[in-house]
Image (cartoon, grey):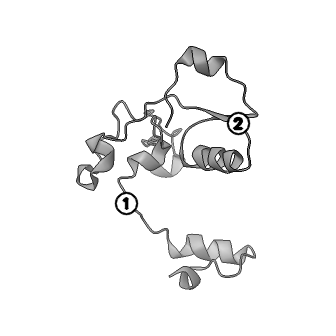
Amino acid sequence: MPEITAAEFADGQFDFLIVGGGTAGLVVAARLSEAGFNVGVLEAGPAVFDNELISIPGHYGQSLGGHLDWGFTTVPQSGLGGRSLAWPRGKVLGGTSALNFMAWNRASREDYDAWRDLGNHGWGWEDLL
């Protein structure tokens, strides 16, 4: 990954500027680059490829609420008696995916079946199981 100064980046000429170096932003940037476009990516957080909180799954949860997390919370939830919940979002190259510790949680049967019921054949619980 080329490292340039903020001034060099600001002087750059880009066909596209992607704001947010999370999973989606980086995929869009990569695809546009593959098509020959000059793409810039702005990310508020650092690139921390060697940070143990990100690279070692056994540190699951330790980066939440820290300097790599934006520290967002939800609006008060009526179904939870007015409580707000933490809503971890990654402030790091890789975004929230960098904070997921290589973990994967399967959604509920109802979530997948709702996709199917909306007309997405093959996306129900049993189909994806």
| Residue at the extreme bottom | 126
Quick one: 107 or 58, which is closer to the camera?
58
| Residue at the extreme left | 58
- CB-based contact (under 8 Å), mark 2 and mark 1: no
Specify the amino acid type for callout 2.
Asn
Q: How many other residues sit within 10 Å of disc 2, few (<14), some (14-19) or many (≥20)?
A: some
Residue 103 numbered mark, or none: 1
Specify the amino acid type for callout 1.
Ala
Q: Is residue 55 above or below residue 46?
A: below
Quick one: 48 or 128, which is closer to the camera?
48
User: Under tag 1, what secondary structure?
Assistant: loop
Quick one: 71 or 40, which is closer to the camera?
40
| Residue at the extreme top | 7
Q: Is residue 61 visible?
A: yes
- Left or right? Give the position of 103 relative to 44: left
- Left or right? Give the position of 46 relative to 55: right
At 23% from the left and 54% from the top, the residue drawn is 58
**Residue 71: quadrant of the picture:** top left
- Residue 12 in percent (x, y) is at 67, 22
Quick one: 73 or 100, which is closer to the camera?
100
Q: How many other residues sit within 10 Å of disc 1, few (<14), some (14-19) or many (≥20)?
A: few
The residue carrying mark 2 is: 38
The first of marks 2 and 1 along the sequence is 2
**Residue 104: quadrant of the picture:** bottom left
At 73% from the left and 45% from the top, the residue drawn is 36
- Residue 108 in percent (x, y) is at 50, 71
At 29% from the left and 43% from the top, the residue drawn is 53
User: Under tag 2, what secondary structure?
Assistant: loop
